Image (cartoon, grey):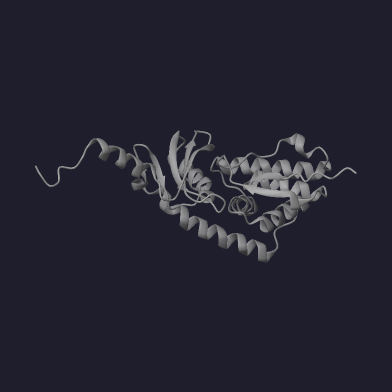
Amino acid sequence: MARDLWVLRFLEMDPGGHLRLWLMRHLGENLADVRWIARSTLWGLLPEPSEFVKLDIEIRLRLLRLIGKLCDLRKGENVPLSVRGFAESSLIGASERALQIIDYWVAGVALPSWLEARCFQSQRHLARRISTALLPAREAIDGLWLLDLPSPFLPFAVAQHRQMFGARNWLVHSGGDRLCPGIWTWTIDTSGGGEVLRRSPASFTPFARACAHRDAFEPTTDGMA
């Protein structure tokens, strides 16, 4: 007798992953097989239009418009609260809230007052967290140091920094996320996108490694001149 194969579906914890999760739920697929993994890009890999071919044309157009707004957000442009709320909830792993926002977006109705208030509260908290990322002291020769900023908040910090100071290529060191704590090193490009170069344990930082390397070749003088 043939046995059903249990095939896991791995999704990155980002807006693209949650759009695919919503699509699976909408098409009646089994969500019990879904497993989340840490994202590899700054904003995540958004679905291609071909992934929506089974949907009604109206739903398809609304989802494509949402993807367009997410691209605007990456550039630092102003977007509706629901778009920012969806992006943030997707990145931090608040899947229920992310799916609810998509439901209302696809239905073409405004967020209910309780969900709108939750998004406002979350965005205020986010604004406070990323405000320190814009301080000049955060920048160094080898990149932007944001070790106290969790990686889900980094895309918003990069977008705001890009909006205020212009686009550039750089390295950014941030905190990790709930799936992979530690120190993440990113490469950011002028388009506002980026990808993870390295994930390191929380006890390790590139600065500490550089100091250890220097001390190995420049031993102390034990107090002697």
Total numbered labels: 0
- Quarter of the image for the C terminus: give it: top left
Which residue is at 10% across, 44% downward? Answer: 224
Side of 8 where 142 appears, left or right: left
Q: Horizontal and vertical percent for residue 154? A: 50, 47
Side of 208 where 161 appears, left or right: right
- Quarter of the image for the N terminus: give it: top right
Seen in the picture, residue 49 relative to 131 is either above or below; the reply is above
Seen from the viewer's position, the closer of residues 175 and 60 is 175
Q: Which residue lies furthest to the right in this view?
A: 1
Side of 34 where 143 appears, left or right: left
Q: Horizontal and vertical percent for residue 115? A: 66, 62
Side of 178 where 161 appears, left or right: left
Which residue is at 84% across, 45% downward? Answer: 4
Seen from the viewer's position, the closer of residues 103 and 154 is 154
Q: Horizontal and vertical percent for residue 172? A: 44, 41
Q: Place residue 75 in its image quadrant.
A: top right
Seen from the viewer's position, the closer of residues 36 and 147 is 36
Which residue is at 53% across, 34% downward? Answer: 191
Which residue is at 50% across, 49% downward? Answer: 176
Q: Horizontal and vertical percent for residue 2? A: 88, 42
